[in-house]
Amino acid sequence: MSDAMKQAGALLTITLDTYVEEITPALPSGQRYTGAMVASALGIAQRRLSIPDPGDALVKSPGATSLEALSQALRSGEMSDASHPYLADELLKYLEVELAITNPKFLERRKG
């Protein structure tokens, strides 16, 4: 991870902590849902910067050029369990990393 990405992650951490600890408690009750959405978005951005892109490994595994190309190959039947028996496991790993980034509480409940 580059220094710029580390700095961006650190900045997001400070921003999120400050927002949750100082700003969110002062929000009127009618704005708490919006405040929670902002905190969630900041958390996703923070995790997105700190976790390597799971799509990179997924795309390399079957030799696709992008997630879109992989999706198209799966939809068209060009790739399948028969032609790539490990692909289901790779897709599951991808999904777990994506959930760790976008919805870690869901993932914790499923694993717990």
Image: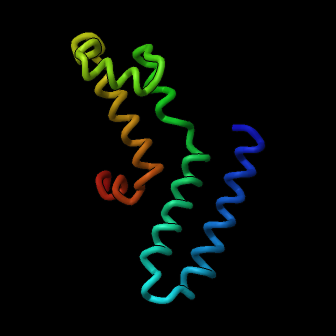
Identify the residue at image location x=48%, y=26%: 57
Instruction: State whether residue 4 is above or below residue 86.
Output: below
Q: Where is residue 97 in the image (x, y as percent from the top left)?
A: 44, 42
- Location of residue 111 in the rendering, given as x and y in whole percent from the top left corner: 32, 51
Question: Colour scheme of this structure image?
Answer: rainbow
Residue at (37, 22) in percent of width and height: 70
- At horizontal 28% and vertical 21% (from top left) the residue drawn is 74
Q: In this view, does 16 lie to the left or right of 4?
A: left
Task: Give the percent coordinates (x, y) of residue 93.
Answer: 38, 35
Q: Residue furthest right?
A: 3
As rendered, which of 8 and 86 lies closer to the eye? 8
Is residue 54 toward the left or the right of residue 19 in the image? left
Q: In this view, does 31 lie above or below 88?
A: below
Quadrant assignment, res 82: top left
On the image, the x and y values in percent for residue 45 come to 56, 53
Q: In which quarter of the image is the N terminus?
A: top right
Q: Which quarter of the image is occupied by the C terminus?
A: bottom left
